[in-house]
């Protein structure tokens, strides 16, 4: 059973630190799809590319999409970029990343050749100062993008029952957050987009965070090996924590509203056996103390370890890889993320 039912859906919309405005007001006109050249060479793959398709009325709510030529509706991978919710863009997948470890052009060509469309989504970033809504703001944007594409599945020749969410870092955490919640489809909404399902067939998460309930999970689960205290985490993460929860002071953080907020963005707690299968990979960084170098704490191998531990406990299928110097766990299937997407779409 899920921890949050219909009451959570209403709370997400109305809570002071939630997603902001009444989402029923976000209806946008259906625009035509204008095709252009792919930003990288498709090397003969028969597919079309369209960019900057608006899924909401905000400044950064657009996506690009590659659509394979097909006589039948295709699967879809929705990719969500990282950047700590403060940077990054949908063009992240236009080129090879992470020193060659992530070859997005080749991966996208593989997916297209296997009759799977690919969308890359941008979303509203957190304000560098004075953020008041927190991570649910960008994450709700991505969820709307998913629902918007479903609403226009016929226009994109997409099978709306065969969609995978994928992402790295903040985009990975976002994908897990969406996938581990109950379906938020609202049949009574005046916005047709919000009547669509938010459930997916699978999730790909690379260099992911396991939970945005930092105080509880990072102390008691993720970094228990290092005996980190909340004071030590707060010393290193104060700016990030304030942005994540949309507060400007420690006093605002210490409130019942933020206790509720932390519970609502705790992906480990949200996970249950009826969620979609997950593919997790945190293998780019050495397994060291989370504050021994910049950018370690949010991408540490132990985030993947905790996701796997929780998945195994609740009975959720997972393909997990984590650790570098040393490698701590590698799934025996050696299944790549694109092979995972192909398998899930065809199940």
Image: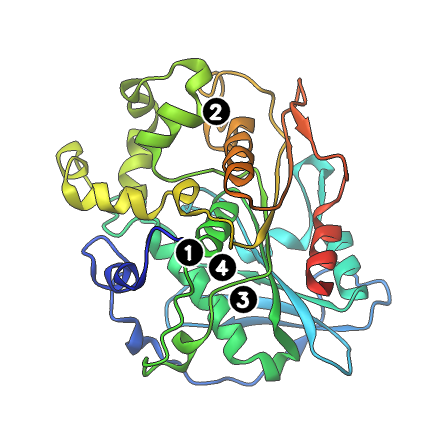
The mark that comes first in sequence, 2 or 4, is: 4
Q: What is the distance, in whole Å, between disc 4 and disc 1 at their CAs?
A: 21 Å
Q: Is residue 138 above or below residue 221?
A: below
The mark that comes first in sequence, 4 or 1, is: 4
Q: Which x, y percent locates residue 328? A: 65, 23
Q: What is the distance, in whole Å, between disc 2 and disc 1 at their CAs?
A: 31 Å
The mark that comes first in sequence, 1 or 3, is: 3
Which label is found at residue 122?
A: 4
Badge 2: residue crowd in 10 Å (few <14, some 14–19, many ≥20):
few
Of residues 137 and 90, the one nearer the viewer is 137
Q: What is the distance, in whole Å, between disc 2 and disc 4 at their CAs?
A: 25 Å
Secondary structure of the residue carrying tag 1 is loop
Contact, mark 2 vs mark 4 (Cβ under 8 Å): no
Q: Is 304 situated left or right of 132 in this image?
A: right
Secondary structure of the residue carrying tag 3 is strand
Q: How many marks?
A: 4
Q: Comparing marks 2 and 1, which lies closer to the viewer? A: 1
The mark that comes first in sequence, 2 or 3, is: 3
Q: Dot 2 corresponds to which residue?
A: 294
Write the residue at 39% across / 74% down: 194
Which label is found at residue 63?
A: 3
Q: What is the distance, in whole Å, between disc 4 and disc 3 at their CAs?
A: 6 Å
């Amino acid at each position: 059973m899920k921890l949050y039912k219909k009451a959570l859906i209403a709370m997400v919309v109305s809570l002071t630190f939630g997603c902001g405005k009444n989402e029923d007001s976000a209806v946008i006109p259906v625009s035509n799809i204008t095709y252009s050249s792919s930003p990288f060479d498709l090397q003969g793959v028969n597919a079309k590319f369209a960019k900057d398709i608006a899924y909401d009325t905000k400044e950064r709510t657009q996506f690009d999409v590659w659509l394979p030529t097909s006589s039948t509706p295709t699967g879809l991978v929705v990719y969500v970029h990282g950047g700590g919710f403060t940077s990054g863009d949908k063009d992240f997948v236009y080129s090879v990343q992470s020193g060659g470890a992530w070859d997005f052009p080749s991966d996208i060509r593989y997916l297209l050749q296997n009759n799977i469309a690919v969308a890359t989504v941008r979303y509203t970033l957190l304000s560098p100062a004075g953020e008041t809504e927190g991570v649910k703001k960008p994450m709700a944007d991505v969820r709307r993008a998913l629902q918007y594409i479903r609403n226009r599945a016929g226009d994109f020749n997409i099978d709306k029952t065969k969609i995978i969410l994928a992402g790295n870092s903040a985009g990975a955490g976002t994908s897990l957050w969406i996938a581990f919640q109950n379906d938020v489809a609202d049949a009574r909404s005046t916005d047709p987009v919000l009547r669509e399902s938010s459930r997916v067939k699978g999730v790909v998460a690379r260099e992911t965070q396991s939970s945005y309930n930092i105080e509880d999970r990072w102390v008691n689960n993720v970094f228990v090996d290092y005996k980190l205290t909340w004071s030590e985490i707060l010393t290193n993460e104060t700016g990030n924590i304030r942005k994540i929860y949309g507060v400007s002071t420690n006093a605002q953080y210490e409130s019942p509203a933020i206790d509720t907020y932390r519970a609502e963005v705790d992906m480990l707690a949200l996970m249950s056996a009826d969620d979609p299968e997950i593919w997790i990979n945190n293998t780019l960084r050495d397994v060291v103390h989370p504050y021994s170098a910049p950018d370690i704490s949010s991408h540490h191998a132990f985030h993947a370890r905790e996701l796997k531990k929780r998945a195994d406990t609740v009975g959720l299928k997972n393909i997990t890889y984590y650790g570098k110097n040393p490698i701590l766990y590698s799934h025996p299937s050696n299944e790549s993320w694109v092979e995972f997407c192909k398998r899930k779409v065809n199940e």
